[in-house]
Image (cartoon, rainbow, N blue to C red):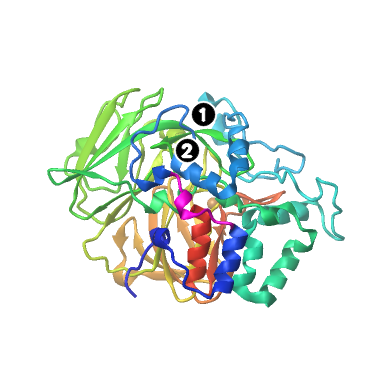
């Protein structure tokens, strides 16, 4: 296999599978016609113009989410007042004492003035029990809430899976989810399609540089934003490069000269560190009061260096970082080798964070985490990056990961296989998964309080969705990002 198209290829999706299958998918997911896309999408790489303060969510990502979910979502998303990191339960069914929460951490950040997130999962506002439906025999409220989280995660993707997995498997899924209840989420977009889809678009459509005398020049802003950790909770007051969390991926080729220009639209100072770079000039290292003075509000600061080593790197705030990185000032910096020995069909960036926004993957908590999608026989490359303050052991069900790089450095003959991969703060691992068996495979942090509480799964939970045919992946992705 050679390195095939990444998820970017879905922009040029053409149905290639039997019509009955894709037709069902398209009908059920109701993808927006490509011609109706926001014209802003024509230049996905621009993004240095994001306004501060009111810019809120990544406009591009947000518009995509709205386009997918319909106008009602726009109203819903813009309606609630922005919570100042108050992420508490909205009902008695919410996770409380038993649900892990980085409260202690947030207490150490008095500037936020409010309790932090519990990890992204919202109580099910419209759960059957809450609406008066009976709790099935032998169940408790926990079961109803836990099912509700998965119902939100799958949304109207659940009925579409009939065309993917066939009648028998679908009948089992329908029974597990209680589809006979005709619950409202069956006709709603999946939770992950109701939040900015940076994972599926911006993160893998890297920021486009301009070229100045051979130097790749990237312009970014540093902004106050409102971030939806999931689709039900009120947005939280966050920070983002180019008004998005994660920030746009900066991607270059080994040996490139890089110039990154940051304009600070915050009301506070900051500094930007490119994590893992072997700088030729240590004054480019981005550590205020060690290698530079802080970037003051309104100021623009330029970093320039040569990307001498390839690999999965990161960029993030290195100033008041517990607060600033915890609130979203992070992004992927990928340096491709000139001839990549690692071959794969699809590529995913998986940035974890765990402090002020709760337990998140790419800025979202389950059920608003975007599944990893692959077709049988494909090899997926996942770039794990830990921007948090805790180690997270990522565990994939039913599959094996081959770890080929650590901190951007190829492991070569030391590559190893595992199904649980601990990633420490600051570390990056590149893992390959060659998928063989169709199914919906849980893929989650195995520190259990990071993923499950009294109301079911939340936070650092995701799935690896393996489908029989590539066209299924393309159809799902198209529906998500259209
Ligand atoms: Cu964890």
Q: Residue at the spot x=71%, y=49% of the render?
A: 455
Per the rendered image, the range of residues in magenta is: 30-38
Find disc 1 in the rendering and name its residue: 109
Q: Earlier in the sequence, mark 1 or mark 2?
A: 1
Task: Give the percent coordinates (x, y) of residue 114.
Answer: 59, 28
Q: Residues within 10 Å of mark 2 (few under 14, many from 20)?
A: many
Does any atom of ligand 1 lie closer than 8 Å to the CB of label 1? no
Q: Taking 340 as reference, is 142 left or right?
A: right
Is 32 a magenta residue? yes
Residue 464, compared with residue 37, is above or below; it is below
- Residue 130 is left or right of residue 224, and the answer is right
Image-quadrant location for residue 446: bottom right
Looking at this view, is 126 or 351 the one in front?
A: 126
Residue that carries the numbered disc 2 in the rendered image: 326
Q: Secondary structure at mark 2?
A: helix
Q: CA distance from mark 1 to mark 2?
A: 10 Å
Q: From where the camera sits, is residue 441 visible?
A: no
Q: Do tag 1 and tag 2 residues touch (Cβ < 8 Å)? A: yes
* Residue 111 appears in the rendering: yes
Q: Whole-percent x and y of residue 443?
A: 55, 61
């Amino acid at each position: 296999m050679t390195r095939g198209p990444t998820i970017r290829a879905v922009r040029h999706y053409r149905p290639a599978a039997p019509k009955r299958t894709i037709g069902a998918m398209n009908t059920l997911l109701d993808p927006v016609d490509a011609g109706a896309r926001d014209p802003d999408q024509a230049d996905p790489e621009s993004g240095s113009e994001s306004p501060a303060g009111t810019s809120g969510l990544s406009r591009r990502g947000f518009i995509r989410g709205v386009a997918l979910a319909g106008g009602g979502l726009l109203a819903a998303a813009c309606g609630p007042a922005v919570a100042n990191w108050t992420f508490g339960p909205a009902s008695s069914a919410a996770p409380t004492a038993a649900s892990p929460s980085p409260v202690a951490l947030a207490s150490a950040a008095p500037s936020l003035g409010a309790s932090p997130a519990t990890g992204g999962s919202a109580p099910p506002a419209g759960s059957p029990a809450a609406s008066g439906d009976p709790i099935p025999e032998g169940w408790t409220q926990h079961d109803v809430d836990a099912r509700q989280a998965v119902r939100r995660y799958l949304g109207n993707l659940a009925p579409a899976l009939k065309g993917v997995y066939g009648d028998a498997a679908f009948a089992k899924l329908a029974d597990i989810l209680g589809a006979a209840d005709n619950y409202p989420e069956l006709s709603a977009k999946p939770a992950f399609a109701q939040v900015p889809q940076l994972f599926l678009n911006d993160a893998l459509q890297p920021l486009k540089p301009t070229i100045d005398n051979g130097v790749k020049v990237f312009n970014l802003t540093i902004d106050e934003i409102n971030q939806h950790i999931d689709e039900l909770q009120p947005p939280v007051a966050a920070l983002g490069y180019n008004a998005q969390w994660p920030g746009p991926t900066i991607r270059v080729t080994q040996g490139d000269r890089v110039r990154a220009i940051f304009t600070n639209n915050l009301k506070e100072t900051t500094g930007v560190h490119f994590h893992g770079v072997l700088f030729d000039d240590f004054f480019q290292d981005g550590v205020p009061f060690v290698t530079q003075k802080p970037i003051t509000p309104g100021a623009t600061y330029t970093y320039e260096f040569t990307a001498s080593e390839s690999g999965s790197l990161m960029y993030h705030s290195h100033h008041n970082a517990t607060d600033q990185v915890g609130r979203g000032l992070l992004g992927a910096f990928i340096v491709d080798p000139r001839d990549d020995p690692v071959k794969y069909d699809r590529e995913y960036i998986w940035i974890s964070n765990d402090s002020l926004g709760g337990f998140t993957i790419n800025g979202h908590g389950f059920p608003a985490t975007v599944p990893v999608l692959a077709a049988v026989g494909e090899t997926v490359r996942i770039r794990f990056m830990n921007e948090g303050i805790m180690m997270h052991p990522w565990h994939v069900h039913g599959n094996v990961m081959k770890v080929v790089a650590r901190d951007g450095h190829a492991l070569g003959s030391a590559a190893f296989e595992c199904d649980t991969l601990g990633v420490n703060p600051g570390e990056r691992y590149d893992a390959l998964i060659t998928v063989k068996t169709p199914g919906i495979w849980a893929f989650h942090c195995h520190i259990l309080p990071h993923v499950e509480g009294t109301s079911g799964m939340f936070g650092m939970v995701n799935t690896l969705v393996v489908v029989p045919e590539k066209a299924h992946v393309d159809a799902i992705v198209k529906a998500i990002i259209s």
